[in-house]
Each structure stands twice: as C-alpha cells, then as structure tokens.
Amino acid sequence: MTDIETFREQQLTRLRDAGALAAFEGAPPQLLAALKRVVGASDFVREALEREAGLGKWLIEEAELGLALDATAMARRIEAAAATAGDPEAFMAALRRQRRREMVRIAWRDLAGIAPVAEALAETSAFADASIEAAVAFATRELEGLYGAARNPAGEPQPLIVLGMGKLGGGELNFSSDIDLIFVFPERGETAGPRRIDNEDFFTRLGRLVIRLLGERTSDGIVHRVDMRLRPFGDSGPLAVSAAFLDDYLQAHGRDWERYAWIKARA
C-alpha cells in the first residue's frame, strides 16, 4: 500500500470513528471510491462531514453531487437558508452553515473529477455573489429600521453598490481567496427616518455590518475574508464613497495599477 493509499484509509477511519460514514453505507462502489479520494485530498471536507451529522445524507439523498448551480439558483438557496434569521448572530450562523455545505459539494465535484476547474471557480464566485447580496439585504433592513432609507436630495432611494474586484470580479474565486470589495453609493443626501444621518455615515455603518456578517469568525467559521484596500486611498480612505467621490479620486489620484485593477470590476 502506498503512502497516499495509507493516508486515505486513515482519513476514512477518522470518519468512521466520528460516525460520519453511516450515510455512505450501501453507496455504489464508485461513490465510496470518490469519498476516499476526496477526503484524502481535503481535510476541510473530512472535518465538515465529521462536524455536521446530516451533511453526507444531504449530499447523497438530495443528489447534490450531480448539481452545478448558477448565480440565480445559488441566490435562492442562500435566501432560503437565512430566511428565518431574526438577528445578526442567527444570520451569521445560517450563512456559515450553508457555506460549509456548498463548499463541500463544490470541492467534492472538483476533487472527484466530476466538474472542470472553470465550473468550480464559477460556483465559488456565485456563492460569494449570493452571500454578499444576502448580507447587504439583511444589513440594510437592520439599519433602515433605525435610520430609515437613504435618499438623495430629490428623495430618491439610494442603494449600496458593492463592487467585486480581483478574482471575485473576474468570476474566478478559488476556495482560499479573500474577496476584494469597494462600497459605493450613487449620491449624497440623508436618511428619511426619525433618526436622520447623512448617506456617507449610513453606508459606512452598512458596510461595517456587511463586513462583520461575512468576515467575523464564529464557532461556525467565516464566510469570506473581506479585503477593502482597493478602495480610494486604501485603508486610510472612507469605507463607503459616493460615485462622484470615486470618479474624482480616479481622475486626480488613480495610479496605473489601480486603473488596471478596474478591468475586472463587477457590481
């Protein structure tokens, strides 16, 4: 037996000792062979199967290993997973549990040779898109409950625009990538609630909450590491900027490498 085969058997033994192999009893030989190959290549998958008792059953009985989800389907899943979350802690727990499931499914398909690399990258990027959108929607509801909706001087609602840069912007996010983001809002103004604050303050608070929802480490881990250093003036600049501020910055201060980075920018 080779060292690789020995290690794979050790990984299976750990799954068996943790009671995580029950879901695979009676599975076709090709699935068991794939399980050995996958856990032999990924401690993350093995640990996830050990941690969540129903994960193996979900993969098999729901035919998850045969699925490749586009951005729309992924967004529906994330929305359903977090639908009952009533506070930030519950939302973060739901989002992290769903991330664990989706990353195991995607990693299995990749390591077992079911899906090509391009498909795995597209799915990890789709999950990031969906999780960001869910976090923005949740954070917006939370803050609008305190301050009302952000509006411009004409009274028109102002959304937070999240720009994905780098690998996320290019739709080529891998399993270990952080996400490079820039927060932009269309126009200055103020919120319309009983506790009014200006839009820059509102979207700065909103951005901080989004970063917390995605990046704070809990007992369930994190969703994504968030990197905001590509924003105007980097770490020393405001967290969220108006479109006019961003345009002025790029015209007056944008360096060549910053302009090149925008080739992959995607809202």
Image (cartoon, rainbow, N blue to C red):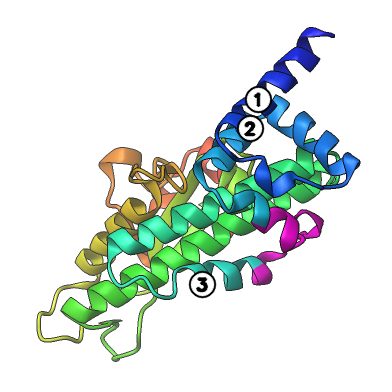
Q: Identify the element where label 2 is drawn.
A: helix
Residue that appears at 44% across and 41% down: 225
Kind of residue at disc 2: Arg
Indicate whether residue 59 is drawn in magenta: yes
* Pointers 1 and 2 in contact (C-beta within 8 Å): yes
Magenta span main SS: helix
* Front one among 88 and 230: 88
- In depth, the one of 150 and 139 nearer the eye is 139
Is the residue 250 above or below the residue 227 in the image? below
Q: Position of residue 149 (x, y in %)?
A: 27, 82
The image quarter containing residue 7 is: top right
Could you tell me if the residues under marks 2 and 3 are in contact, i.e. CB atoms within 8 Å?
no
Residue 42 pos. (x, y %): 65, 30
In the image, what residue occupies the spot 36% across and 79% down? 158
Q: Is residue 48 left or right of residue 198?
A: right
Q: Amino acid at mark 3?
A: Glu
Give the magenta range.
58-73
SS for dot 1: helix
What type is the residue that disc 1 sits on? Thr
Residue under the image location 84 percent in, 9 percent down: 1
* Residue, disc 3: 79
**Which residue is identified by label 1?**
13
**Total labels drawn:** 3
Crowding at label 3, few (<14), some or many (≥20) Cα neighbours within 10 Å?
A: some
The residue tagged 2 is 16
Foreground pick, 128 / 109: 109
Q: CA distance from mark 1 to mark 2?
A: 5 Å
Q: CA distance from mark 1 to mark 3?
A: 36 Å
Label 2 vs 3, first from the N-terminus: 2
Query: In this rendering, is residue 169 above or below 86?
Result: above
How dense is the environment of label 2, judged by Cα within 10 Å: few (below 14), some, or many (20 and up)?
Answer: few
The residue at 20%/65% (across/down) is 201
